[in-house]
């Protein structure tokens, strides 16, 4: 499968700051998803996006499905220490297909 | 929500032995499951697609004779690492998809297992 381009690779921020990360692909996906993975555990779904241009929020998290269907971003507002972890974007061609993951963004938040 | 469970969470084995990892969908039937492999500080890489009642589809570069996948029921897929070697040490994660005929469009494969860490000595 294709690996998506995710940036930044890592972020080191202070509590209360906003965070933004993005993901791009050379091909179109019909679904974009954002996951968080804590050490030694499987990924947990944060936000799923199903339509180009869609902007969806989940608490302090906001994600958008790019209009070209080749990109997506995730914003975290007012970060807190428990936001620490690795965030992965994933693109899915269609229901029933496997996910293609980005390389991940490692987020560290200092109190 | 739907739950996917993997067992064991941790396994340490000697080189040359075989190890079986189970992936179960606990509250739904999964006709399709996916097996991923994740090396430290890297992303998840798809190994194979497991379909209930038929042979698994392997990604390029994944040895099907080494990574045996069996999806004998709608709630269980197993990954067996045969003749394991130290380079097979990794974090293996499964993902289960709701029956595509029942799932809303675009919501396939939202549920991941907790992962199984394999260490081969």
Image (cartoon, coloured by chain):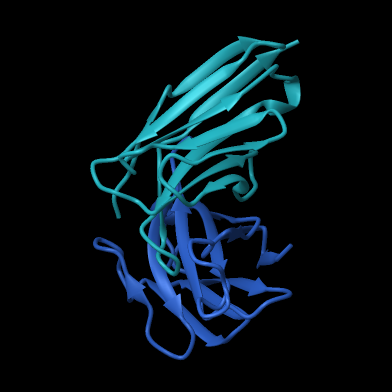
B41 vs B68: above or below? above
In the depicted view, which residue is nearer to us: A18 or B90? A18
- For the image, the number of numbered tags is 0
> x, y percentage for residue B49?
41, 71
B17 vs B85: above or below? below
Residue B120 in view, yes or no: no
Left or right: A40, with B33 as reference point: right
Q: Quadrant of residue A93?
A: bottom left
Left or right: A42, with A93 as reference point: right
Q: Quadrant of residue A86?
A: top right
> x, y percentage for residue B82?
43, 72
Q: Quadrant of residue A36?
A: top right
> x, y percentage for residue A81?
74, 21
- The residue that appears at 65% across and 74% down in the rendered structure is B24
- The residue that appears at 57% across and 13% down in the rendered structure is A12
Q: Which quarter of the rendered picture does the N terminus of chain B lie within? A: bottom right
In the depicted view, which residue is nearer to us: B41 or A18? A18
The colour chain B appears in is: blue
> x, y percentage for residue A91?
40, 49
Residue A17 in view, yes or no: yes
- The residue that appears at 40% across and 40% down in the rendered structure is A102
Chain colored cyan: A
In the depicted view, which residue is nearer to us: B98 or A42? B98
Left or right: A98, with A86 as reference point: left
Left or right: B10, with B41 as reference point: right
């Amino acid at each position: 499968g294709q690996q998506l381009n995710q940036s930044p690779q890592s972020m080191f921020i202070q509590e209360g700051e906003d965070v933004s990360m993005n993901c791009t692909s050379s091909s179109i996906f019909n679904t974009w998803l954002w996951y968080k993975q804590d050490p030694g555990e499987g990924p947990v779904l944060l936000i799923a996006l199903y339509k180009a241009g869609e902007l969806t929020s989940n608490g302090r998290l906001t994600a958008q499905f790019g209009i070209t269907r080749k990109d997506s971003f995730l914003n975290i507002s007012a970060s807190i220490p428990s936001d620490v972890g690795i965030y992965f974007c994933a693109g899915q061609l269609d229901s029933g297909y496997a996910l293609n993951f980005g390389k991940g963004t490692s987020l560290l938040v200092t109190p | 929500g739907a739950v996917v469970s993997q067992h064991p969470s941790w396994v340490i084995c000697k080189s040359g032995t075989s190890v079986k990892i189970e992936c179960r969908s606990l509250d739904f039937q999964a006709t399709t499951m996916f097996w991923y492999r994740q090396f430290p500080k890297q992303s998840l890489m798809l190994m194979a697609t497991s379909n209930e009642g038929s042979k698994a589809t392997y990604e390029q570069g994944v040895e099907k004779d080494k990574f045996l996948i069996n999806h004998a029921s709608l709630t269980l897929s197993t990954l067996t690492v045969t003749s394991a070697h130290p380079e097979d040490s990794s974090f293996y994660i499964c993902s289960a998809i709701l029956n595509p005929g029942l799932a809303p469009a675009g919501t396939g494969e939202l549920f991941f297992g907790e992962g199984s860490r394999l260490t081969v000595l």
